Image (tube, rainbow, N blue to C red):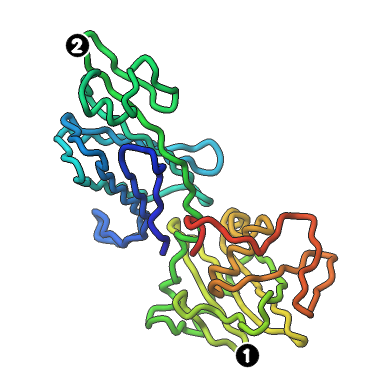
Amino acid sequence: GLRPVSLTGSSDPFSLIMSPSMRQVRKSDSSESMVLVITMRLCNITAVPLENGVRLDVAFDEEGDNSVCSTTLYKNEIEAGDCITWEIALGHWKIGDLSLRASVTFLGLEKESITHKWLHGGEQADDLSGESPLVGDDDEGTMDVAILCEPTTISSLFTLQPCPLVFFSGHNGDTNAFNFLWSQLEHTSELMFIESTPQKEAVVDAKRGRVTLLNGATGCAFIAPGGDRILCKHQINQGGSHSLWIKSTSSELMTSLVGTSALKTSLLRFIFGGNEFILKEEGSPMNMNGNHVKHDFPSITMKHSPINAI
């Protein structure tokens, strides 16, 4: 899974931690489905209470023009050092990465209160920067103060789960079920690669589920939340290079996973673990000595941010 990610800076008066997870739920018709659960944990790290509570606003931006917003009010006092937790469940969304933007609004702060000074480092309300806009300013000497959090992205890789039709008996998948599904899928792609660290052999991560196939090949099978499937076959070629054949029910899912060089490298890390890989692009030679080949795109062996590290 993904490690929790902080959406706030060191100078913010609160800490907001986001942690995504996939959870199986039972629907009203007694069927089961997987939903993406976003857990948000807010801690008051000031030395004063937040007497009137806070409002949490979260916007989820899908690839394209779609956006979903969630707003939650917590009107109770939050003591210094206390934490509160929200959970937001997303059942359906468009295939692709999901961007998350959050903001926290402190409700009903008195302009001259010690809490107000903690939030703004002792500055007067008229001197506040645009990063912490004032909303709801009224004649009674109170105001709502909104603070924008750091945006983050949830990779579509995180939402992939082992396909239950293949892995119905555990991490060792059923070969016949895999071969049947493989023959039904129409959208295909192939990745050729080598390992930048030859001492560490690339094998399908058993935690993702592994299928043993003929001629020394191995496979893995995943299902996306919308029901689309993606299957992969891995083979080590003569000379030490690797081939990964990919088939899917959805061209959109395929594009979201292998549409760019960076996405291809992320998929290889997801399937094989934390190794570093060098892709063979169309028309470019494969360097089998482990030396990096010059590319016309940014280094594909770069480390990803924690939110994309699977």
- Tag 1 secondary structure: helix
Within 10 Å of disc 2 (Cα), the crowding (few <14, some 14-19, many 20+) is: few
Residue 103 horizontal side relative to residue 305, left or right: left
Q: With 221 as the anchor, is 91 left or right in this view?
A: left
What is the three-letter code of the residue carrying label 1? Gly
Q: Along the line of sight, which residue is nearer the eye, 122 or 58?
A: 122
Does residue 76 sit above or below 254 in this rendering? above
Can you give x and y, in whole percent of width and height, for residue 46 in the image? 25, 39
Amino acid type shown at disc 2:
Glu
Give the residue drawn at x 52%, y 50%.
97
Instruction: Please name the residue that numbered disc 2 is placed on.
Output: 140
Q: Give whichever of 97, 219 is nearer the camera.
A: 97
Depicted 209 relative to depicted 153: above or below: below
User: Which disc number belongs to residue 30?
Assistant: none
Q: Answer yes or no: do the residues labelled 1 and 2 have beta carbons within 8 Å?
A: no
> In the displayed structure, would residue 88 be above or below residue 172?
above
Q: What is the x, y in percent for residue 154?
A: 47, 52
Task: Compare marks 1 and 2 and give the one earlier in the sequence.
Answer: 2
In terms of image quadrants, where is residue 302? bottom right
C-alpha span from label 1 to label 2: 75 Å
Task: Quickly name the residue at label 1.
Answer: 216
